[in-house]
């Protein structure tokens, strides 16, 4: 599948890896792919910004989550303050005590794996390219894959940024079909 990726699509995938590493996350999720797309240049990034997404704001939101696989909002809903737990643990055991091995210690990290949702989004990007009768997968197709499933974190972050996800999907599809013409 990756042989069909254009330069901007490959840059989105490598950019997502860089974003995940910079945030100290031990995985590459749909949120990292979205952040890489927003932070890039080109038509897809421009469209995302026109819909209210901002790389710095998105990065800050992802940084607030504290990294890892823990969902601070979900824990807060059951009465657990993840940041308070993190502070107390680090006070007792030192900075980065909750970080997975290879994270946050200044050393190169091990290979980052894609989450199940990120893999599914990349697979869906191929399906969107096929649906649009296009032979290559570019950044716009990746975005359509990311926005395909409302359960993806990328979709939730897009909504939280104030964007109308259906309208964004339409604008990206329109952009892809006009580029192909």
Image: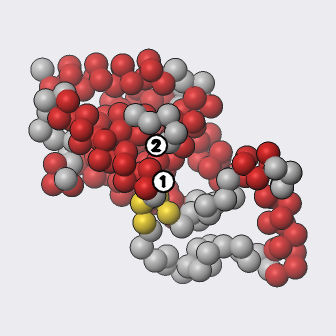
Q: Is residue 165 above or below residue 31?
A: above
Q: Is residue 132 above or below residue 89?
A: above
Q: Element type at marker 1? A: loop
Residue 22 percent location from the top left of the image: 54, 61
Residue, x 19% and y 53% (percent of image)?
1
Using a 10 Å C-alpha cutoff, classify the residue at mark 2 as few (fewer than 14 neighbours), some (14 to 19) or many (20 or more).
many
Q: Element type at marker 2? A: helix
Relative horizontal placement of residue 36, taking residue 123 as reference (left or right): right
Residue 37 percent location from the top left of the image: 41, 42
Residue 143 in view in this figure: no
Relative horizontal placement of residue 138, taking residue 145 as reference (left or right): left
Instruction: Give the label on residue 34, or none.
Output: 2
Residue 103 percent location from the top left of the image: 59, 74
Residue 143 percent location from the top left of the image: 37, 37
Disc 1 marks which residue?
Answer: 29
Relative horizontal placement of residue 123, taking residue 116 as reference (left or right): left
Front residue (pair 171, 115): 115
Residue 134 in view in this figure: yes
Residue, x 54% and y 24% (percent of image)?
163
């Amino acid at each position: 599948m990756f042989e069909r990726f254009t330069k901007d699509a490959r840059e989105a995938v490598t950019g997502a890896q860089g974003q995940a590493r910079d945030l100290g996350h031990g995985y590459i999720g749909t949120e990292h792919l979205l952040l890489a797309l927003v932070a890039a240049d080109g038509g897809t990034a421009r469209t995302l910004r026109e819909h209210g997404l901002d790389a710095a704001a998105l990065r800050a939101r992802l940084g607030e989550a504290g990294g890892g696989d823990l969902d601070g909002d979900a824990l807060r809903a059951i009465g657990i303050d993840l940041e308070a737990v993190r502070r107390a643990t680090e006070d007792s055991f030192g900075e980065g005590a909750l970080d997975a091995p290879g994270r946050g210690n200044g050393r190169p990290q091990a290979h980052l794996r894609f989450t199940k949702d990120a893999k599914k989004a990349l697979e869906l990007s191929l399906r969107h390219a096929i649906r649009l009768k296009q032979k290559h997968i570019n950044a716009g197709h990746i975005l359509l894959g990311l926005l395909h499933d409302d359960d993806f974190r990328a979709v939730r972050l897009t909504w939280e940024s104030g964007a109308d996800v259906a309208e964004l999907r339409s604008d990206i599809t329109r952009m892809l079909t006009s580029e192909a013409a």
